[in-house]
Amino acid sequence: MDEKTTRRLTMAQALVAFLKQQYVERDGAVQPFFAGCLGIFGHGIVGGLGQALQQNPDFRYYQTRNEQASVHMAAAFARVKNRLQTFACTSSIGPGATNMITGAAGATINHLPVLLLPGDIFARRNVAPVLQQLESSQSQDVSVNDCFKPVSRYWDRINRPDQLLTALPEAMRVLTSPADTGAVTLALPQDVQAEAYDYPTAFFRKRIWHIHRPRPDQTALAQAATWIRASKRPIIVAGGGTIYSDATAALRDLVEQTGIPVGESMAGKGSLRFDHPLNLGAIGATGTLAANRLAREADLVIGVGTRYTDFTTASKTAFQNPDVRFININIAEFDASKHYALPLVGDAREALTELAGLLKGYQVDQAYLEQAAQLHKEWETEVDRIYAIRHTPLPSQGELIGALNELSGPDAIMVNAAGSMPGDLHKLWRATHPKNFHMEYGYSCMGYEIAGGLGAKMAAPERDVYVVVGDGSYLMLSSDLVTSIQQGYKLIVVLWDNSGFKSIGSLSRSLGQGGFGTRFVYPQEGQLVGDAAGENAKPLDIDFAMNARSLGAVVLECQTYDEYVAALKAARKTDRTTVITIRNDRYINLPGYESWWDVQVAEVSDMPTVQAARKEWEEMRAKERFFF
């Protein structure tokens, strides 16, 4: 091809033409990196990128209802695809753009690739201030899109059409990097989008980005094997990187070879099947009795693809052995070095495979192996107990989880993000495959659930996708039920109505604050909208079933556990997105299973309940550790 030939295109047309030619390859499998574009057109995007998408129907555009939801969809899609495919998301300048910031933060925190293409103010400036422009008295090169900088892995503003030639390769480098991926933002001034330029034809050649599997340093691997052989009570913490690198089989092989038990983070749940005898289940603040007991006494913690959030470490109280050491396998050097660990910087699958080779002939002591297996059995008995509860008059959340887990099918995907559900699901959900448990808990964003469920369904249309959402999250962002129906992606949405913010209500009570501001009731004179309002307080007149029905969904209303079970069975046979509604008891919670989460309690208060909570907090705070 003649390198000097050119194509005269608008900046927006060139952008779409470039994105269409971006592919990724890992382990010999090649696929397009972008599945299309999600978004809503406004005046700052329609004549530029909107026109470019219109003339490129093979780069599919999906009309959504909320810009934040668009980013959640793209992130969820990328998660199911193990970060090997994603969407671009677009919006107009102004509120459409800033709506995407929350989603951008979630994508970056969760290390999920999403390309954001917000419209921007006029680069030529002569007509400023334009509609929705934020003016600054200190600079004419500031817009609301500058707010994306701290929540993006890469940020750029395309002030000239030719700047695409250097910006787009950098954007792709970051998007396809297992270590650095997250939200990438390219702000597109609305006049520049429509300006033409003679782009080199070579710029639009098919480009394959190879996702390599870097191996850890051999000296570090040998040292890790020595540490493991010397340990008496090792434990593995499986994080999301285990799944993203497709290392679940390698993890299982290492576990079965060595007998080292596994605890799973929120993102790592499903790394090992729930019924594996050495899977101790969830670890940390929302962990199981099995995982937390072994973690407390562990002398060696092997982290695989985990960031060690405060939930995973139970606010640095989970690992109490004074001699505990850490080995961290992570593609990101930043995470591999946490807790003064021996860092194995590299791909999780390759690291686990090579480590297994260095550990031939090694296995944990038989007594430790038997203890781990026994704790696994005891935990499964506890899950059975909670699943069998039949609380009246309102069912408990644990029994609702049990019915959903047992009736949803082994190939399904369960999606959740916020409220009291994540902790209970982390403990109780029996994951049957690596994508079965889809929990957005890096940002725990209320409103992710339905949009994330739609993204998951778009990535895996052959699977049933169940969206677990509370009444609070549903009220925040349910509009893309319409998108799921419009695009023909059926979701089964399970809406648990607990008359307010159940999670924060429980947390408030644990801090001695009586659930202040967490119930959906009408305020009464002289009383606060919390537990103090009493059970006679009038609840808000919210008809979730009517709302979902008005958006085009099939709705199944339930009053009892038996009706809920029948609805779960019926929902699998409906022809479009179906919403199941049921009220549950907001005051029934699962035990803490010997764990803790640090939430500050007021040091000074006139409330005796807060004073008591502060005393308990100080006792637990003293158990938090530094690791040197």
Image (tube, rainbow, N blue to C red):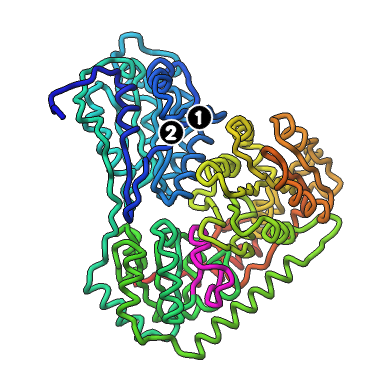
The amino acid pointed to by label 2 is Gly
**Residue for badge 2:** 36
Q: Quadrant of the C terminus?
A: bottom left
Question: Percent position (x, y) of residue 130?
Answer: 40, 13
Vertical comparison of 10 with 443: above or below? above
Question: Percent position (x, y) of residue 256?
Answer: 46, 78
125 falls in the magenta region = no
Regarding residue 518, the answer to whether it shows in the image is no
Q: Quadrant of the N terminus?
A: top left
Q: Residues within 10 Å of mark 1 (few under 14, many from 20)?
A: some
Q: Which residues are magenta?
A: 262-281
Question: Percent position (x, y) of residue 470?
Answer: 67, 46
Disc 2 is placed on an element classified as strand
Image point (65%, 57%), residue name: 409
Regarding residue 152, the answer to whether it shows in the image is yes
Image point (44%, 42%), residue name: 105
- The mark found on residue 377 in the picture is none
277 falls in the magenta region = yes
Q: Is residue 262 shown left or right of residue 463?
A: left
**Residue for badge 1:** 62
User: How far apart are labels 1 and 2 at the CA level?
Assistant: 8 Å
The amino acid pointed to by label 1 is Tyr
Q: Quadrant of residue 521?
A: top right
Q: Quadrant of residue 591?
A: bottom right
Vertical comparison of 570 with 481: above or below? below
Q: Earlier in the sequence, mark 1 or mark 2?
A: 2
